[in-house]
Amino acid sequence: MSDMKTETLVLHAGWRADPTTGSVAVPIHQTTSYQFHDTDHAASLFSLSELGNIYTRLQNPTTDVLEQRIAALEGGAAALGVASGQTASTMAVQNLARAGDNIVSSTDLYGGTWNLFANTMKDMGIEVRFADPSDSQSFADAVDDKTRAFYAETLPNPKLNVFPIQQVADIGRAHGIPLIMDNTAAPTLCRPFDHGAAVVVYSTTKYIGGHGTSIGGVIVDGGNFDWEAAGDRQPTLNSPDPSYHGAVWSEAAKPLGPIAYILKARTTLLRDMGAAMSPFNAFMFLQGMETLALRMKAHCENANQVAAWLGDQKGVTKVFHPSLMDGEMRARADAVMNGGYGALMGFELEGGMEAGKKFIDNLELLYHVANIGDARSLAIHPASTTHSQLSAEDQMASGVTPGYVRLSIGIEHIDDIIADISQALSKV
Ligand code: PLP
């Protein structure tokens, strides 16, 4: 199954049919708990000598299929479904960094992740050091003996410069430091494990769900990082864990496969903090995944056309989309993106803040929402919404100019998308 192509994996990985009923659709296992066969069975599940269902906070058969399907899609070893993309980012870091430790993150991040890293992680005692994604060496420069992970997004908005995954992953590996990639904007287009990343996180809320119905997240373990060799660099996986009878995760996971990282996340962080994915949402994400490859192609084709068209419009001073880039940025995009450059884009209006707001108010087909990755086309004016709490200086530093508009191009007919953007622009 794992050598099958993306279009097949999104439909088939992790499931054939229900062994008792023959159900082809994955059933929604809306249950909290699972009857043990006997006390020996219960004991072996709790001691992890056998993996199986105990309680839905820890695992659920519906969520399990989603986890297997996403792990297969990414070419990873195993995955963990959680309550949201934010939970995935939080737990991916906490699984390696404890109070007193640090991680090094790209500055180009979704605003919610920026807040998590700059404020909430700081309150937890985890320092996040920010590095410049245009200079891979800045990651190396920020490392000290307490650095436990690198973190970045594949296709971060607003600038949409593809992250140099391989360069930064290689720097990390030389120090025993894994690269965690948020691949939310590029499922099926980029497989970060193929370029050296060790962990992938998703907000499944976006393209994987695809229809704007459910909040969720997934952490994927690449199974490609030698935690044991990293020694003292990775104490959470290489020293006895008092919360699990002194288990050393890099040892304890061996009989189960290269899944030490995700096994620890499930059996300690998810157990203790409880931010589990609901089985109903897992079902919705499985449903979304069936058309993910098809949708991503349609998203990308439409986005290329919108980007090219926008570049010729009066009053539009700049368009941000990898399809329009050249030089190093285009080379980076071509090195990791397969089958398209994603469907997020931005453009700047000559008229600044007022023009940006007016454009949004004039839209009739595109939705004005704080979301991305929906099948519908979406738009937002960051300076007056998502980035309005930032000072003018910080807005500029993050790439959000007063006239910047963000688009998440959907899968409607291209003529209708362009017609709506065109009429909204004509009234600015
Ligand atoms: N990562 C990226 C790139 C996002 O765009 C978002 C949400 O917009 C998140 C993570 C957080 O995901 P969620 O809203 O599912 O918590």
Image (cartoon, helix red, strand yellow):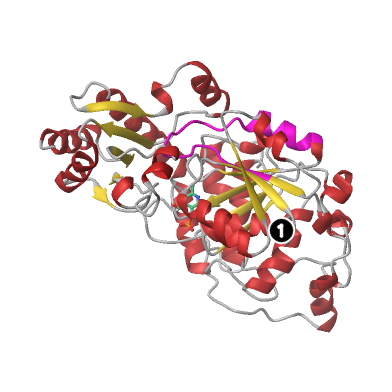
Magenta residues? 150-174
Which quadrant of the structure image shows residue 277?
bottom right
Q: Nearer the viewer, residue 60 or 120?
A: 120
Residue 39 in the figure: left or right of residue 89: right
Q: Residue at x 10, y 37 (%)?
A: 427
Above-or-below relation of 145 to 280: above
Which quadrant of the structure image shows residue 151?
top right
Residue 143 visible, this angle: yes
* Residue 296 image offset from top left, x and y in percent: 42, 38
- Is residue 159 part of the magenta span, yes or no? yes
Furthest residue to the top?
327
* Residue 10 image offset from top left, x and y in percent: 53, 45
Q: Quadrant of the C terminus?
A: top left
Residue 204 in the figure: left or right of residue 52: left
Which quadrant of the structure image shows residue 353?
top left
Q: Quadrant of the N terminus?
A: top right
Q: Nearer the viewer, residue 24 or 352?
A: 352
* Residue 330 image offset from top left, x and y in percent: 49, 21
At label 1, counting other C-alpha atoms closer than 10 Å, the crowd grade (few under 14, some 14-19, many 20 or more) is: many
Q: Which residue is drawn at 38% across and 55% down?
A: 389
The residue beneath circle 1 is 95
Above-or-below relation of 329 to 379: above
Residue 426 in the figure: left or right of residue 305: left
- Is residue 136 part of the magenta span, yes or no? no
Q: Which amino acid, by three-letter code, is at mark 1?
A: Asn
Q: Nearer the viewer, residue 118 or 26?
A: 118
* Residue 35 image offset from top left, x and y in percent: 69, 81
- Number of callouts: 1
Residue 260 in the figure: left or right of residue 334: right
Residue 66 visible, this angle: no
